[in-house]
Image (cartoon, grey):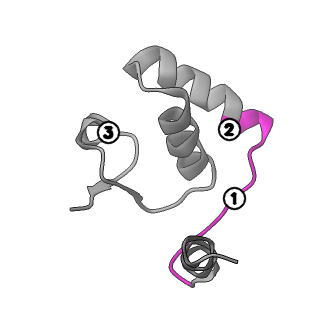
Amino acid sequence: MGRCCWITNAFFAGPHVTTVPLSGSVYRRAALIRARHHFGLADSLHLASAMEHRLDRFLTNDNRLAAFAEIAVEILP
């Protein structure tokens, strides 16, 4: 396994990361987010997943997502 894969696997295995399944309710919410906010599909799915699973914050380095008021969005450097 290459260094990049090892780092990625180590990151997602850490206690600071939560992975959640994509359900029908996530897809429906993502469609609403995409329609209302004109975010891309991946951003909409990520935001919808965080909301559906009642996560307390959404971490991103995309400044455009800071305007999304339905969940606390934390912009990373």
Q: Residue at x 55, y 71 (%)?
A: 4
| Quadrant placement of the N terminus | bottom right
Percent across and percent down for residue 22 are: 74, 45
Percent across and percent down for residue 63 are: 23, 42
Q: Residue at x 60, y 69 (%)?
A: 18
User: Badge 3 is on which residue?
Assistant: 65
Mark 3, Cα crowd under 10 Å, few <14 / some 14-19 / many 20+, is some
Whether the magenta-drawn stretch holds residue 24 is answered as yes
Q: Is mark 1 in CB contact (under 8 Å) with mark 2?
A: yes
Along the viewing direction, whichever of 49 and 70 lies nearer the viewer: 49
Task: Identify the mark nearer the N-term, 3 or 1.
Answer: 1
The secondary structure that most of the magenta stretch takes on is loop
The answer to which image quadrant residue 39 occupies is top left
Whether the magenta-drawn stretch holds residue 25 is answered as yes
Indicate the secondary structure of the residue bearing disc 3: helix
1 sits left or right of 32 in the view: right
The answer to which image quadrant residue 70 occupies is top left
Disc 3 residue type (three-letter): Leu
Mark 1, Cα crowd under 10 Å, few <14 / some 14-19 / many 20+, is few
Residue farthest along the front direction in this orientation: 2
Disc 1 residue type (three-letter): Val
Along the viewing direction, whichever of 65 and 72 lies nearer the viewer: 65
User: Badge 1 is on which residue?
Assistant: 20
Percent across and percent down for residue 73 are: 32, 52
Label drawn at residue 7:
none
Percent across and percent down for residue 47 are: 50, 43
Q: CA distance from mark 3 to mark 1?
A: 20 Å
| Quadrant placement of the C terminus | bottom left
Task: Identify the mark nearer the N-term, 3 or 2.
Answer: 2
User: Badge 2 is on which residue?
Assistant: 26
What are the residue bounds of the magenta stretch?
A: 15-26
